[in-house]
Amino acid sequence: MEKLFVQTSTHPYFIYTEEDIRFSITELLPKNYSSYFIITDDVVAKLYLDDCLQNFSQDQQVAHSIIPHGEQTKSVDTYYQLLTDALSYGLDRQSLIIALGGGVVGDIAGFVAATFMRGVDYIQMPTTILAHDSSVGGKVAINHELGKNLIGSFYPPKAVIYDTATLTTLAAREVRSGYAELMKEALIRDESFFHDLLGTSLAALTNDQLVSHLQSGMAIKAEIVEADERESGIRKHLNLGHTLGHALEAELGYGKLTHGEAVAIGMLFALRVSEKLFSINLPYDELYNWLEQNHYPLTLKRLNPDLLLRKMKSDKKSVHNKVHMVLVKQIGQIQDVEVPDQDLALLLDTFLRELVIE
């Protein structure tokens, strides 16, 4: 079993990674709880809910709720229903919430945990590659129609239990989505990791490669979170690609692009803006070619740049209605920059013209 230690201002926790670890949940919990509430989605439930339920004895109080899969589920309505479920099941302040699923489940279940009775413990059990990023660091949230993750909190889990066996059932699109975040982490911190990923074909991905890449990505994320838990400094670097990515998700409608697909396009835009503002050359073509070879959607229907810019301004990273973008000076050297509206509008219009199909 691989163990990665994460220190936060509230409490430390471990990320446990191993194949079939879902059958050993109770052995990894920090304490016994009065009751357990598993939150999962309708896809993951069919695959792994029964496996998780096997961990508990008949005299333990265990309940579960199944939500629809997809980004559109991360809404105030679903959040309220889960709170109602928790109350109906008799959860108290000594209960544990288990988030079994991908990033959507982790975000909304974590936000339920952060706010139910002013906060109860929860653990993350990610079942996607993408969730290697969202399950580490304690950001929990739901979406608003005006923007993604605008309602949320910083609330770290008590543990992350990552069963790599669950990744074997992922569709190719989900693999692509997760690898976009791994590519982001490589650009932020590790040029060697970046080139390793560029040499990886997702269609021929081996389990050893996947586990190695996940360990590298989570180590980068954990190191940054430990240094800046509340995103007052370098944790902002983890938003590389997300300024445009989140705007695309909101403008197109949640679920039209996966989060990772939107971030991939956002990273390309961030590199274009970086090249222009810093007068440098970056591996834009190398990244574009890798994304294209691995079948990321790199064309868009015609979009209104003004509407996208408005969405970018409503992003939680904006300050005084000014867009702040995470930009790249070189691989491993990242800078948070306020981009003037006029420059951003021109750069966005040019970039979108490259990707648009009629």
Image (spheres, rainbow, N blue to C red):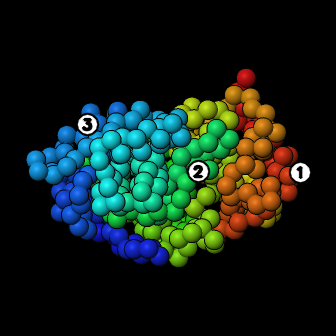
Q: Mark 2 packing: few (<14 Cα in 10 Å), some, or many (20+)?
A: some
Q: Is residue 60 left or right of residue 95?
A: left
Q: Amino acid at mark 2?
A: Ile
> SS at mark 1?
helix
Q: Are marks 1 and 3 in contact (CB under 8 Å)?
A: no
Q: Amino acid at mark 1?
A: Gln
Point 50% across, 59% down: residue:
139
Location of the C terminus by quadrant is top right
Q: Amino acid at mark 3?
A: Leu
* Residue 147 place in picture, x, y as percent: 65, 44
Q: Nearer the viewer, mark 1 or mark 3?
A: 3
Q: Are marks 2 and 3 in contact (CB under 8 Å)?
A: no
Point 53% across, 59% down: residue:
153
Location of the N terminus by quadrant is bottom left
Q: Are marks 1 and 2 in contact (CB under 8 Å)?
A: no
For label 1, the residue is 342
Task: Name the outermost residue toward the left.
Answer: 58
Mark 1 → mark 3, Cα distance in angstroms: 49 Å
The disc, 1 or 3, on the residue closer to the chain's N-terminal end is 3
Q: Nearer the viewer, mark 1 or mark 2?
A: 2
The disc, 2 or 3, on the residue closer to the chain's N-terminal end is 3
For label 2, the residue is 151
Residue 317 versus residue 9: which sits nearer the camera? 9
* Residue 287 place in picture, x, y as percent: 59, 50
For label 3, the residue is 47
Q: Mark 1 packing: few (<14 Cα in 10 Å), some, or many (20+)?
A: few
Mark 1 → mark 2, Cα distance in angstroms: 29 Å
